[in-house]
Image (cartoon, coloured by chain):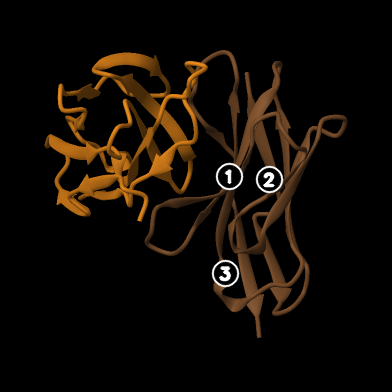
Chain colours: A orange, B brown
Amino acid sequence: DSGVTQTPKHLITATGQRVTLRCSPRSGDLSVYWYQQSLDQGLQFLIQYYNGEERAKGNILERFSAQQFPDLHSELNLSSLELGDSALYFCASSPRRASGRSDTQYFGPGTRLTVL
Amino acid sequence: AQSVTQLGSHVSVSEGALVLLRCNYSSSVPPYLFWYVQYPNQGLQLLLKYTSAATLVKGINGFEAEFKKSETSFHLTKPSAHMSDAAEYFCAVSDQGGSEKLVFGKGTKLTVNP
């Protein structure tokens, strides 16, 4: 158990709908990352938050958005869903070292999204 | 831009045989390198990491990896495979100075035959 929790574990929805995925980082970790794992694209970085602020953006679609709340949990919102959005979505968190750089990323169990 | 290439999407070994999973990276700055393992229907678990200290890194479950700058490689090895090692293995790179995102290889699925 990495200490990172994600809910729900599975989500089945229809095209055009909107869903919210939730992530709670390990206690004390300020950085949260979101990744998408699909058969055709593999594991891809979507977005990073640090202590409530967006830190880095990757291949995140405009239909997707995220935020990190004051209690450090994060939510990934996916809207106007398409069949191709079906994937495993991972959240990871990392502590910050004395040097200021984030350390190892610890991954949650993921949310499997199926769009029908 | 950073990238990772994992040679061999599927590797099959016999129980007790050497495991060798290959990873080559591309980075314009000194990298941090990681190996993660994913068991079926589970998340990613860190096996080991290289962060510019010792070039030979020991991880969990008997795995180790050696950072070779001249070859831009970070291959994962285990002297003797167990059935429980069957899983998918991902190599990842993160640069030290820029974005802290992980760039992953496409993964290598390891099968261990009895």
Q: Is residue A35 left or right of residue A104?
A: left
Task: Name the mark on residue B6.
Answer: 2
Q: Say if B13 sits above or below A95 in the image.
A: below
Q: Nearer the viewer, residue A60 or B34?
A: B34
Q: Which of A10 and B95 is in front in this view?
A: B95
Chain ID, mark 2: B
Mark 3 or 1 closer to N-term?
A: 3
The residue positioned farthest toward the bottom in the image shown: B114
Residue shown at 74% from the left, 78% from the top: B16
Subunit ID for the residue under disc 1: B
Q: In this view, does A87 lie above or below A95?
A: below
Kindly check if marks 2 and 1 are in contact, taking CB atoms under 8 A apart as contact: yes
Residue A110 left/right relative to A18: right
Instruction: Specify the amino acid type for callout 1.
Output: Lys
Please give the chain letter of the residue carrying mark 3. B
For the point 15% across and 22% down, the residue is: A70
Circle on res. B86: 3
Q: Residue at x 77, y 38 (%)?
A: B55
Sequence-first disc among 2 and 1 = 2
* Residue A22 percent across, percent down from the top left: 19, 39
**Circles 3 and 1 on the same subunit:** yes
